[in-house]
Amino acid sequence: MNGLLTARALYFCYYMALGSLLPYLNLYYERNGLSGVQIGVLSGLGVLVSSAAAVLWSAIADRLKIHRRMLIVSVIAAPITVLLLGRTTSFPLFVPIVVAYALSIAAIVPLLDGTALEAAQLHGRSYGEVRVGGSIGWIISVALVGVLIQAFDIHWLFYSYVACMALMLVFSMFQTRRAHSLRAPWSSNLRVLLSDPTVVIFLIGVFIVMVGNGAVQNFFSLYLDGIGANEGIIGVAWAVAALSEIPVMILAGRLMRRIGAAGLLKVAFFMYALRWLLLSFIQQPIWAVAAQLLHGLSFAAFLTGGVTYLSERTPEGLTTTAQSIFNAVCYGAAALAGSLAGGYLYDHSSMPIFFRIFSLTTFAGLGIFWLSSARPWKAAYGADT
């Protein structure tokens, strides 16, 4: 298998596994008697541990060039912890297992993103054209697992995850060796990256925007359950969102040639804010499913734009570390803040207020990133508009 095909297959399997787990895990928690705050703590704890470990694992992988071996170990460890989750029913016991799961998956996404960026460059493709395999895998699993849970029981989310990760393990054996290596000391390259004002403003903006995304991701299934959607409809809602990613992923390269990665990020931030605002007025499952069509122009545009924007500013050989920082901010620090804030709002306010608050914070993040585009340092660092 060539590097491009392997990267697509790895994304397909991993996001098929995540699609089996993430949309339904908080339902599993709730059905075991956990409160909104407890669910938020577990979600936040997972992303905190995962994001901190991701930077460490990624730095080790970049310095020692053990990307393939680290991925294989992660893919073996993750399903073991997920099986333990499925055998646990109390909050105190969930905590150490969630920590173990977070440690096991921490390096996977940065490793996959680093491989995809290199394969895309080698074959003349955009990152989005490779990452689209993950969207397809997610669509299949969220729809199928929702039906399995409705027909049998909620433990099928754990069995499905294990099956998908087993398939991923097979494909990970075919991963090619990374071609790029460090041309300067790792610490020097890292200082160069984090001293770039465009990178700093970018990370601040995405943190603010992804607080809202983290909150909604954790409580969207509970919101749907609260307005009368069954597990099948919940699966369809997540599948529709992933389906909307595909055209954006495929066309992202063309869009960025016209408006740049920063332009695509502005579109994504605006669509996120609009999406949360619309959901604050929706009380019927069918309309909530329809609103998921905005996911492509929010999440997919954000992901492809963000990964590309940061990659353009990353010293060669530091790709995995840079992407782990991006993931730590978006899916670590921001997701933690979103999980805790979302859990509090879920317990103490209404869902319309929940969505409107995060719509406002997202507009704030857009404003910060937009204003930074006109700063005088832009020309010096070659940022796009």
Image: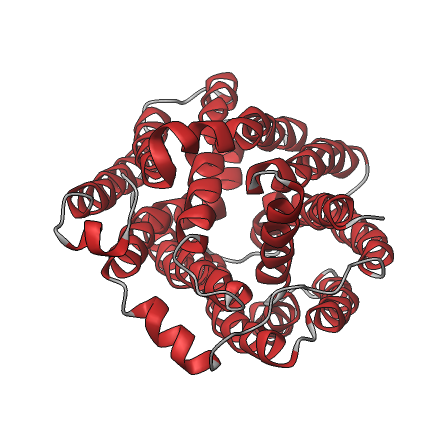
Left or right: 259 as drawn, with respect to 15: left
Left or right: 365 as drawn, with respect to 236: left
- Which residue corresponds to the image point at 69% horizontal and 64% vertical from the top-left? 85
Q: Quadrant of residue 78?
A: bottom right
Instruction: Give percent across and percent down for residue 324.
Output: 50, 64
Query: Please, is residue 56 above or below residue 165 in the view?
Result: below
- Which residue corresponds to the image point at 51% horizontal and 74% vertical from the top-left? 183
Q: Quadrant of the C terminus?
A: top left
Q: Quadrant of residue 181?
A: bottom right
- Which residue corresponds to the image point at 71% horizontal and 72% vertical from the top-left? 70
- Is residue 315 among what the camera can see? yes
Query: Please, is residue 7 above or below residue 80 in the view?
Result: above
- Is residue 155 among what the camera can see? no
- Which residue corresponds to the image point at 49% horizontal and 58% vertical from the top-left? 39
Left or right: 166 as drawn, with respect to 363: right
Residue closer to the observer: 77 or 252: 252
Instruction: Give percent across and percent down for residue 64.
Output: 64, 81
Residue closer to the observer: 296 or 35: 296
Instruction: Give percent across and percent down for residue 76.
Output: 79, 67
Instruction: Give percent across and percent down for residue 243.
Output: 61, 26
Query: Please, is residue 149 above or below residue 312 in the view?
Result: above
Question: Colour scheme of this structure image?
Answer: secondary structure
Left or right: 257 as drawn, with respect to 78: left
Report the number of discs: 0
Q: Quadrant of residue 191?
A: bottom left
